[in-house]
Structures are given as structure tokens and as C-alpha cells.
Amino acid sequence: MRLRLFLIGLALLVVACVDPEDLLLHGTNDIIVVDGTITDRAEAQIIKLNRSQADPLTGRFGTLPITGATVQVAVDSSVLVTCHETVDGSYQLPSDFKGQVGHAYQLRFTLPDGTSYASNQQIMTATAPIQKAYAEFNPKSLAANQFDGFTAGHDISIDTQDPANQHNYYRWDWTLYERQYWCKTCQQGVYTVYKVLPHTYLYEYYFVAGNELFEDCFSPPTYTTDYGAPYVPKGYWYYDYNCRTACWEILCNVAINVFDDQYSNGGLLAKRKVASIPYYQHAPCLVDIRQLSLTKDAYRYFQLLQQQTQNTGGLADSPPTALAGNVRNITNSRESVAGYFSASAVSLYHQWLDRKDADGIPLGAMDPEGPHNNIGDDLFYALNSRRPNPEPSPPYQGNRFPPNVRIWPNNDRPPTAPCSPSETKTPFKPEGWQD
């Protein structure tokens, strides 16, 4: 949960920053936030559209995905490629689309109310390859406020040869893959593979499942007038379910790291630190380091954002301001639009961390209730600040208390849950993963 809150906080930084530059839009309380980067890799190319709004009573900001927009990317001002909405606010280009160095890309989108927006053109420039990466355990790797004082992690640095006789701008980010063994949490309900039949009960204790696939949480009402319906407790409770197949948690960086080669043009960038990987658990993990090229304007934007995220005291201490990007309302130039659309070539490097050099207790093992007994429980605790609570299995007798919701037949309870592909999980073994 702490990580999720930190990621949400970073997403909102575009509307909670303080900087005297003229790129800041002051006094805004309802703005569109754009986030999208076209790359030259065969990967999902996604544009995200959100609306950041301030609560009229508290003044606190929240974000809502913008759905139903028509989103296109113009290639070299001649070819329009249409995106399709995958989940609310996320618009993906065709699966076979990838950018090319030297070509120009422009984002265009129209909201359901007919308002149209466009970015400036972004010409994709080449980036140098990452030659080598280094990983070193550091008990002070992380910022003290990231995980309530826990700072242990691995510093990752890279070597790359900067091309001579050209001005280059760099950005680095990373993706962390950890083996995940818990795939679903059901609140006020239980997971069921098959759809529960309506108004069908057994012994006044069981809801009855049929043969139609459901694969989701079943949360019955706490009160019903149905004769023979089981009692369902009120209040807040939940059960966690193991993954049915191999699964990997996907975690991404929250810090911005950019570089201008103005004073090192043509030299070797040696052991440039590009990542701080939290020491979540003892188990090994995989880190994908990405080196991206930037245009001059994109570098300026991300440099300002980097300075603000490092220098502000926190979201609660910042007045509502927005860092303007390169997207504009076509008919109303006075509208505030935050975020940035860019095009970047990418050099990818797989770094395997066996964590054998790690010292001390990982974040996931700091449960005050004591050590965890099952593999994967440390990672679950690190991400959720609680230990897993599996649904009790039958037979329900003696000291084996039944779950708050019982489903018949119960010979295969509790079930496992599929590892559904998403932004935070994947059932596909990452390239570079070592079994």
C-alpha cells in the first residue's frame, strides 16, 4: 500500500509543484494530464489521459481517467494511427506499431464533448547503448520518507559511451520484476471460479455455484429477505488468493533521472547511477534498465519536474500549480494542460539481482507480528503493509472457523486466482528472468 500511495503521489506532482519558471500554471483546479512516450521497441505504446481535480471542500487533488476520447498519433504529419482504449484512460496504439529514429510524432485527441488537443511534434533521436551495469547493496539507497524510514536497497549504475559531435539528452527509468504468489484480494466476499446461482442456497450456510465461468470476487449483500439465505457479516473483511500459475509483480521507478551531455560530450559516462531498487525480500529479482533519448524541450520539462520532486516538502505543503507540457487545446490556448508527450529511442539492459550481497532484514520481513512462513508473503507484506489472509479451507469443524461466505461445492476451496496481465502483474516470464 505504501508503494501504491507513493506512485499516486508522483502522478499528482504535475499539479502540486512550486517553481518560478513560466512553464508553471498557477491557480488551476481542473486540468487534463497527459502521459505518453512513443519508443522504438516492440512493446505496448500507451497514451494515458487523466483529469486532475481539486475537491471543492478540502482542496485536495485527485485524478479521474478520461474515457471515450478519440486518440491518434500523427507520423511525419502524413499518417494518422488510431489508438484503442484498453482500460479507463489508457489508449494503446496497434500492437505492431513502434517508433523509428528520425521520424516525427504528434499526439492528437478529442474528448467526448468535442474539445480537441494536440502536442507539438517530437522527433525521435537515437540513444547510445548501455555497455555495462553494476549493482551494489546500499543500506542507505532509498530516501528515508519513501518507506517510513526503511532505506536499504541496491544501487544500479551503468556505463555508456556518449556520441561525439552531437548534443544528447538522456533519461533513465527502470522496471522491477518480483515473483508474486498472491493474485487476488476479495473484500466483503470470496473468490469463485464459477458464477453463484441467484436465490439458491444449501443448509442456510452455503451459496451454490453453477457451471458458468465467473473468475471474480462474489460479494453478497449483508441483508436479504430470501428464505434460507446465509448470514453475511457486516464490517470490513477480506481474503487473499494464491496465483494459479507463475506470476510476476511489475514495479516501476518513482524518481526522475535526466542528463545533459553539454560538459561531457563524446566521453564515457562511467558508473552513472540510474536506479535504487528497494530490498523488498530475500528472493532474487530482475531489473530492466532503460536509457531513453530526449529532445531539448522534453529534457527541459523533465529536468524541471526532477527539480520539483526533489526540492518540495511534499504534496500537502504545495499550493495547486501545474507544470505545463507540450499539449495544447487547439481552440483555447488559455486552458491549462499538464504532462508531456514524447518520442524516445530506448536502450534496454537486463540486470539480474540475486541479492546474495544484501545485509540486514528486507522490508517485507519487518512485520511486527513475526516472521512469515510461506514463500511470497514477504513481498505481499512489503507492498500491502499487512500479511496475507487466505480463505479458510474445509472441513469447517473444531478450531477451523469457516469463511464469512461459504460456497457449495466446497471440495476445491479455496480456489486459486489467475494472474491477469495488467500494469502491475504479468503471467509471462520476463526476458532475462533466471529460474
Image: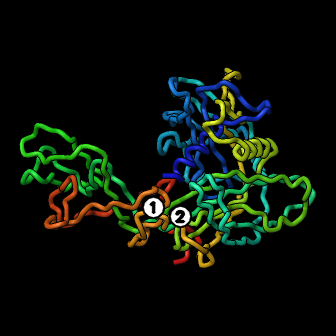
Q: Residue at x 25, y 63 (%)?
A: 414
Is any atom of residue 101 visible in this view? no
Relative depth, front residue between 348 and 357: 357
Question: Sequence order check: which comes first, mark 1 or mark 2?
Answer: 2
Q: Where is residue 319 in the image (x, y as percent from the top left)?
A: 66, 30
Q: Position of residue 391 (x, y in %)?
A: 27, 60
Q: Dot 1 surroundings within 10 Å: few (below 14), some, or many (20 or more)? A: many
Q: Which residue is drawn at 47% across and 44% down?
A: 87
Relative depth, front residue between 349 and 316: 316
Question: Judging from the image, what secondary structure is the residue with disc 2 in?
Answer: helix
Q: Which residue is drawn at 59% across and 60% down?
A: 150
Relative depth, front residue between 48 and 304: 304
Is any atom of residue 425 visible in this view? yes
For this orientation, the residue located farthest to the front is 368
Instruction: Look at label 1 and name its amino acid.
Output: Tyr
Q: Position of residue 421 (x, y in %)?
A: 45, 57
The residue identified by callout 2 is 363
Q: Estimate the spatial distance between the alpha carbons at disc 1 and disc 2, rounded to whole Å.
A: 8 Å
Q: Where is residue 226 in the image (x, y as percent from the top left)?
A: 10, 40
Instruction: Look at label 2 and name its amino acid.
Output: Leu
Question: Judging from the image, what secondary structure is the residue with disc 1 in?
Answer: helix
Q: Is residue 156 above or below residue 68?
A: below
Relative depth, front residue between 107 and 3: 3
Left or right of residue 378, residue 406 in this image? left
Label of residue 381 in the image: 1
Q: Are marks 1 and 2 in contact (CB under 8 Å)?
A: yes
Residue 394 occupies quadrant: bottom left
